[in-house]
Image: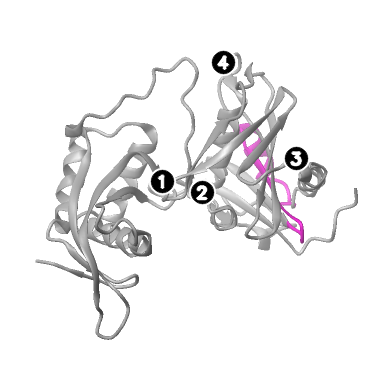
Amino acid sequence: MKTKRPRKEALFIQVPSPDGAVEFHDATAYIGRVMPFKNPKSTCGMRVTGEVVAFSLLHLTKKTATSMATKELLIPRGPLTRVEKRALELASEIGEDEVLIESELGNQKCRITRDANGVVELEPTGDDVTFELPREAVKISIYMRNNVLGRLVSIGFIGHPGRPGSPENLRRVASMTLFALTQLSHFRVITGMVSVVVPQPARSLPAQVRKSEDKVQLEIPLWLFDESAPPVLRTSGSVYLEVDLDKANPNTGKLLYQFTPSKEIAEIFEEYRVILDATVTEVLRTKLEDSEINSIAIEIVLGEVDSGTVGRLRDAVTGLAGGLDLTPRLRQFHS
């Protein structure tokens, strides 16, 4: 099957940032030139046609990173073309909110579930495909559909997701791949995936259920207005806020929140979710530095949140305790 001429091609390089996180930089302008970044961690090529958006993610070992530093940068057209062609071949098999995962170790289909924050989780439709990690790099391909764009999204990944000989499963490797790509803004915009839940390794302890004293929770009174001038009160009630201490986006430093509206406002609450989410983030930033919030996000992803972090977050959200007047785009604090 012949692929169409690309509308866009790009290359991104992932390198450590000063705060210890990693971030992608657009290196497309350096194609044909020597690597401009020190200590690259991964590369990602992107190719866009009218039917497919393809990504090729390569995690670098120290050896390949050293070798790349002396060579001209190139768009990985071969890997991109391969997953683009394969996506077109599989188009009829890819349903809405489904992921097809292919590898030399086996194939698997999963359902995509999303929460209100754009956090994605892959749920298996059958048994997980398990295997022992080989010494050589693992190669997998992921295919899904974006009905908003009217395109297929295809991903090729090459890398070492763990120690050779360790037990692993295909869904977990695919989840790690998607999580890595959510650190690329282009991928987040195209897929709507803010972050991805990576399943626990098979031999790790199950995730513990948090006790109430280990959570960051607050009930916030709300008065919901329309956007007329002057605004007219539609209804009032409250929303139960919980800061998510199990999932976060370490790339943006954005903490995620769970909102449970009272029955009085539940019917129209979704119209006000975006402004409330932004307001919670704004309040946190009046008490915590951006670098501190980013560090907390990394703690959450690593599962290392301690009582001190819980205490700081609880103190920060108390600025919302008085309640809020909200329109779908504006907010005003109650004292």
Q: Amino acid at mark 3?
A: Glu
| Residue 327 pos. (x, y %) | 29, 72
Q: CA distance from mark 2 to mark 4?
A: 26 Å
Residue 250 image label:
1
Q: CA distance from mark 3 to mark 4?
A: 31 Å
Q: CA distance from mark 1 to mark 2?
A: 8 Å
- Closer to the chain start, of discs 1 and 2, is 2
Q: Which residue is mark 3?
A: 93
- Closer to the chain start, of discs 1 and 4, is 4
Mark 1 crowdedness (10 Å alpha carbons): few <14, some 14-19, many ≥20: many
State which region is magenta.
48-74
Residue 183 image label:
2
Q: Left of 271 or right of it: where is 285? A: left
Residue 72 painted magenta: yes
- As helix, strand or loop, the secondary structure at mark 1 comes to loop
Q: Are marks 2 and 3 in contact (CB under 8 Å)?
A: no
Residue 102 image label:
none
**The C terminus - image quarter:** bottom left
Q: Left of 185 or right of it: where is 31? A: right
Q: Nearest to the eye among marks 2 and 3: give it.
A: 3
Mark 4 crowdedness (10 Å alpha carbons): few <14, some 14-19, many ≥20: some
Q: Name the residue furthest bottom.
A: 229
Q: Is residue 40 above or below residue 31?
A: above
Mark 3 crowdedness (10 Å alpha carbons): few <14, some 14-19, many ≥20: some
Q: Which residue is mark 4?
A: 166
